[in-house]
Image (cartoon, rainbow, N blue to C red):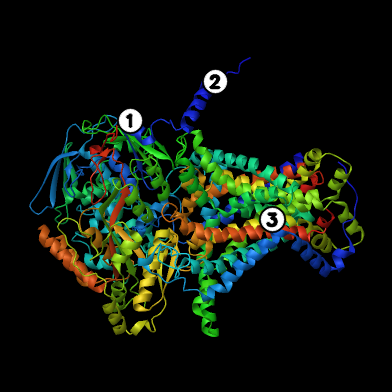
Amino acid sequence: MLRYLASRIFQGFLVLFALYTITFFLVKAMPGDPFTGEKNIPEDVKRNMREQSGLNDPLFVQYLNYPKEVLLKGSFNYSIKKRRPVVEIIAQAFPASFVLGISALIFAVMLAIPIGVISALRKNSWVDYSGMAIAMVGICVPSFVIGPLLQIGIATRVPILKIAGWDSPIDIVLPAITLGLATAAYLARLTRGGMLEILSQDYIRTARAKGLSTGRIMIVHALRGGLIPSVAFIGPAFATLISGSFIVESIFQVPGMGQHFVNAIVDRDEFLVLGLALFYGFLVVIMNLVADLLVGFLNPRVRIAELDG
Amino acid sequence: MSRVKLNHITDDDLVEGTSLGRDAWLRLRKNRVAMISLWLLTAVVILCFVVAWFCTDPNVINLTNKFASPSAEHWLGTDQLGRDLFSRILYGGQISMLVGFVATAVTLLIGISYGAVSGYMGGRPDSLLMRIVDTLYAIPFLVLVIILKVVIAGLVTDLAGWTVENFGWNKEFVFRFANIIPLFITIGALGWLTLARITRAQILSIKNQEFVEAARSLGLSDRRILFRHIVPNTVGTAIVYATLTIPSFILYEASLSYLGMGVEAPNSSWGILIKEGANFLETQPSLLIIPGLFFSVTLFSLNFLGDGLRDALDPKASKD
Amino acid sequence: MPIRFPHSVRAAVLAAIAALTGCGGPSPVEKATAEKTLLLGNGAEPQGLDPHLVSGVIESNIIRALFEGLCVEHPSENGKPLPGVAESWEANERFTDWTFHLRKDAQWSDGHPLTAHDFIFAFQRILNPRLGSEYSFMLYYIIGAEDFHQEHRSKVICAEDPELPTPWETVEKEVNLSGNPEAAEGSFDQKGLDHLSTDELRQLKADPSLLSWPESIPENTRSFLIDHLVAFDESGESLWDRIGVAATAPDDHTLEVKLRGPMPFLPELTKHYTWFPLPEHVIHQFGAEESRFTDWTLPGNLVSNGAFTLKSWRINDHIEIVKNPRYWDAETVQLNAIRYFPISNVYTEARMFFNDQLHATYALGPELIAYSREHFPKELRNELYLGSYFIRCNVTRSPLSNPKVRLALSLAIDRQSVIDNILQGGQQPARGLVPPSGEYQSPDLVYFDPEEARRLLAEAGYPDGKGFPDIRFLTTDRESAKRGAEALQGMWKEHLNISVGIDQMEWATYLSTMFKKEYDLAAGGWIGDYLDPTTFLDMWLKDGGNNRTGWFNRDYERMLREAEQIADPLARYQKLQDAERLLLEERPILPLYWYTRNYLLHSDVKGWHPLLLDNHPFKFVSLESSHQ
């Protein structure tokens, strides 16, 4: 187990380095530069601006400089546009995204897993159909519609809920619902599918035939295997949720990471893009590791040793 | 944990493919919800791909007649620029269905094979393949879109222009569809990652089951075992996932069209109609609701049909 | 045992019950009005608060409240500067030499006295080429400022030297002074003679071939230039003093500025943040003055001299500024605080306003203008704004290289219909490029006439649009941009029978495509920086930088140059009008409409009047509850 973890952590570093390399060259390949603005800037002024961010160096030097700064000084450089340390920007934005993401995930899991399980058990009954219909609403109605609907329909009627803003804990409710619904829909569908798969497996049938009560079969056998697709999905989905969503953040004025992800790219703010990509990559690596461990735990047939050679 | 050894492989699977299809159809026909869905879906397809050609031009603007209510001339009224909403929905449906199905098909193909191979091989190859997925997962998608727009879109336009010149195809028609090719490439490039992870997780749980051991002992090749015996067990999840990705790709198309990828103005798609309609939530909600209804009916049908298909195709289901 | 809730929980539950049953407390706006805190939507997260390193309206809204220049805006009258840091000012007859008398009680928010030297420091900093300010050109009116900013060292040091072997005109034309962007990265040729460091100059002295010299410059001229530049660097004299940039502080409370041309509206210009003083003592504390990456503008560090000081700043959340007790005119200031919210989603912003969460919105979407007209008629503001929307034509490409085609495209646009049906904000159809401001009237040359348009297109060789090549209209990724583009596309199809494709691109791609002139038609707009037609006309000079159409005209350049030297305002306007007429006759740009500002303003807000530049002086704004 320890060897497995060590190897995965080592692999994680490789992933981050590969990610850095790809992102670095992609960012350089985008048209425009951080100083492209509506007002023209004379070339020598631009050169002076680039100079202060080290952007006049040859490409390869720049490519090596960044990891050097990161590893030796722990510095992720400054955002070129906002002129603040990248670390500081992420540190300001991540808490909001994290809280929102966790709330959305909890909401999604609480809503989706029961619906998925019950739908599978009562397959093709009205319970199943209405459960899946609810899930489909979460898919068919995009967040840029759900958000405004919640604002108009609920926030205007319930005095403690605001249209948008991020001051008190109650402000989490509407964005979390908006963000969580789509995830809930995926989860409910995947849980139902996974459960059906397991319920039709022979060992479950046998257990049923042996006269074990439905409840026990459910918990002991079916749920463990039935949740595998959901857990595999939650891993990366969780990383996505806690790293923010541009749409939800802009609808509800949440000072999270999603807006930075989009704006940094639109601004061609290289160091912020790199910092955010690496941070997100870090989350993905961690979450996928956790998800893999969970899958191993849920499914005794997958031995940890086998997850990795 | 009780497990019972049972061999999953029957000769039926391998030989009598046609009878399996017929059985499936018979089973599907008994599923009322799935059949209703099938009919609805057929109706939408006919509307979009047949009836649409008899409708008014979806791009003719009449600014003085914007937001008109339904009338004999405009069955569903007009939009913010006075264009006929009904024909915009039908023409938009062509694009959106194409995007939904093709992009999903690409995703399924790559995602399932990748995940299956990775999970089945295990060991170092598996680690490598999955770490590649992790890496791709974190690449900022928007950056990729902006670059692909610049790189591919020009090529595709040239290609489309070439077909118009050399084959005399209808220019507007060609360009309307040519513009979504870069979109397929973009979505195809990164859309399959989650599916690959899900498939792999399932393969891991299946590959040590007894029927696989049995197949091995029969001396079947790895490829045959994987794609004939193991992968079919993951198809259920894949179908479920596909019915989920179709709507998200359709909506994605709308976001990307604003970045110059996907449908080009003034042409419509369902995603674009919904996105534009969302701006009129307070003022003209019908612009959101009507396209939204077409979109939802199609997706609900797809979804329930997908479930029905899954049941019908599952050889084990008949034993329930 | 009875269960005891902690107080806070009980209070929260009670509050929740109260809220859910509708007995909620006052709304955020009611509360803020009582506390005299103004809640403002402000469009987006500012790029920063350093007045020398920003260029947008969003930043200006905050900076204007924090800092104060020589003059301040009048709360209700356009183009009528009130005394700011300057108590009084006077100019000579030609409006070229100005003297500003600073008030003695002006001070920074940390109690440090504010003197004329803070202005000089600020001017030196914004003109320092190392800083890389985008807006330095706003000070180019000062004699010597441009030479300093562009480091015209050879010119300053050698041009007047009688011993220079080659005439200066030849040197200026032939020698690579300012650098060649196409030359190899890091080479001397790329930097140019004027931009070389002392070390590089010494290297060049040893080996003059490091820079490519033209044949026409003899050996002795080359070494003369290099020697004098090295000598100057070694003397340690500052370029500013050597040039004698004409901004000086004879004493702590007097600022003298000499301009290179008459400028009756200089006080107007000093309201712009590029002319503001900066606290030298604070900036030096946090790093070099030319560093772009210091913390001096963060809360706790920022020291300002305006009516407010910075209290808190959370990225993408809010910026709060509070009343500055050390402000010289603190008695006038009625507000205790202003909270700026960077709300980029206009629908969210409007809904927040409708739900009593904001005193004013930054913008208002076209759909919501009509809605507000019906539901919030009292709050809806519709004000003239100094901005002009136009379409750029790439005149370097056929068919838009033909002025007749450009004119035809322009004549086929039904501007009133675009305004009434799409923009819906009461904009004015453009009759020229420069929107009405003060005495200036733009020549009335832009109108809608489809007949004439067809005739011109036929004359250009495309009767009824036959044979007209496919052209593309470049625009941005906004939904409103798309709607407008679709309407224009429809009009050109209907009236001229030509097909124009639409290219939507995200902002930076849109800009770089436009810069590279890889477009046919491109949507564009311009907001005036100050109340004078030149803010719109200067951009079409050949080297105007914001031209991007490939168009230029010698007569046009000459007229603008002549106008620069005319002291009489009316005669000057006449000259500028002639220039604009010429521009419109050639029509490298197709003006569409003049902007209006549409936004929502709560009735609690007092002292807020329509202003052409939309730069409301917050020191005169107050809050009073309008309903008891």
Snapshot quadrant of residue B35:
bottom right
Please tell me which residue lies in front, B199 or C624: C624
Tag 2 and tag 3, C-beta contact below 8 Å: no
Q: Residues within 10 Å of mark 1 (few under 14, many from 20)?
A: few
Q: CA distance from mark 3 to mark 1?
A: 55 Å
Q: Position of residue B174 (x, y in %)?
A: 53, 76
* For residue C465, side relative to residue A114 (left or right): left
- At x 40%, y 65%, the residue is B81
Q: Amino acid at mark 3?
A: Val
Which is more toward the observer, C145 or A107? Answer: A107
Task: For the residues labelled 3 and 1, say whether their Cβ atoms are less than 8 Å apart.
Answer: no
- Are labels 2 and 1 assigned to the same chain? yes
In the image: residue B138, left or right of residue B254: right
Q: Earlier in the sequence, mark 2 or mark 1?
A: 2
From the top left corner, tell me how far across and down residue A90 is, in percent: 51, 42
Residue at numbered disc 2: C6
| Label 3 and label 1 in one chain | no
Q: Secondary structure at mark 1?
A: helix
Separation (CA) of disc 2 from disc 1: 30 Å
Question: Which label number is shown at residue B240?
Answer: 3
* Amino acid carrying mark 2 in the image: Pro
Pick out the residue farthest to the left: C93
What is the CA distance from the residue labelled 2 to the residue labelled 3?
Answer: 47 Å
Which element carries disc 3, helix, strand or loop?
Answer: helix
The chain holding disc 2 is: C
The x and y percentages for residue C417 are 31, 66
The residue that label 1 is drawn on is C35
Q: Amino acid at mark 1?
A: Glu
Please identify the residue farthest to the front as the structure is shown.
B72
Task: Examine the rendering and report whether any part of residue C177 can be seen.
Answer: no
Name the quadrant containing residue B305: bottom right
Q: Chain of mark 3?
A: B
